[in-house]
Image (cartoon, rainbow, N blue to C red):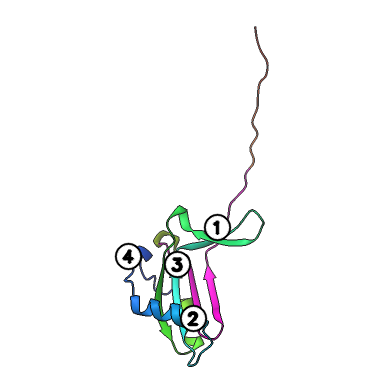
Amino acid sequence: MGPIYGNIGHHIHNQTLNEQAINEVGDGQLPNKFFVSVSNAVAYKNADGEMDFKPINGTKYRSAMIEVFLSEKAAKDAAEAINLDPDHEICSVTVEDRMTGQVYDRHIVEKVEVTYETEEVNDDFNL
């Protein structure tokens, strides 16, 4: 059981790390770095039956850059240690690198259960 990192809305925003990730993720340059981030996005099947993402419970999309690593293993180990917890809006964790972009993703999937029940309609008009 790993750390939760608190509610994303209350996470300390690391502007420098966020800007570094925006500028470096997928740029194809060396040295390679691995950026770990979390978000409140859950996966679901859209109308076309394809997987898509949306913020949990209709909230505004939020993400937070957690840390940067110099090895893929260290970044994946850190990502795997993060508890996904919809109550704290930690719904996905992603590792992205400079060479290829996204290299690891783990997320909560929204499941909708279909239920059926019998309903009786009485069209008998007693005049």
Q: Residue at x 42, y 62 (%)?
A: 89
Q: Identify residue for label 4.
A: 10
The answer for how far apart the CA atoms under marks 3 and 2 are is 17 Å
Q: Upstream in the sequence, badge 3 or badge 2?
A: 2
Q: Which picture quadrant has residue 45?
A: bottom right
- Per the image, label 3 sits on a secondary structure element best described as strand
Q: Identify residue for label 1.
A: 110
Q: Upstream in the sequence, badge 3 or badge 4?
A: 4
Query: Viewer-proximal residue, 28 or 93?
Result: 28
Q: Which picture quadrant has residue 22?
A: bottom left
Residue 105: % across, % down: 54, 73
Q: Nearer the viewer, mark 2 or mark 4?
A: 2
Part of the protein shown in magenta: 89-115
- Per the image, label 2 sits on a secondary structure element best described as loop
Q: Nearer the viewer, mark 2 or mark 1?
A: 2
Labels 2 & 4 near each other (Cβ < 8 A):
no
Position above or below: 125 against 85: above
Is 103 in the magenta? yes
Q: Quadrant of the N terminus?
A: bottom left
- The amino acid type, in three-letter code, at marker 2 is Val
Labels 3 & 4 near each other (Cβ < 8 A):
no
- The amino acid type, in three-letter code, at marker 1 is Glu
Task: Tell whether 113 sits left or right of 85.
Answer: right
Q: Identify residue for label 2.
A: 25
Q: Nearer the viewer, mark 3 or mark 1?
A: 3
The answer for how far apart the CA atoms under marks 3 and 4 are is 12 Å
- The amino acid type, in three-letter code, at marker 3 is Ser
The answer for how far apart the CA atoms under marks 2 and 1 are is 28 Å
Is 111 in the magenta? yes
Dot 1, crowdedness within 10 Å: few (<14), some or many (≥20)?
Answer: some
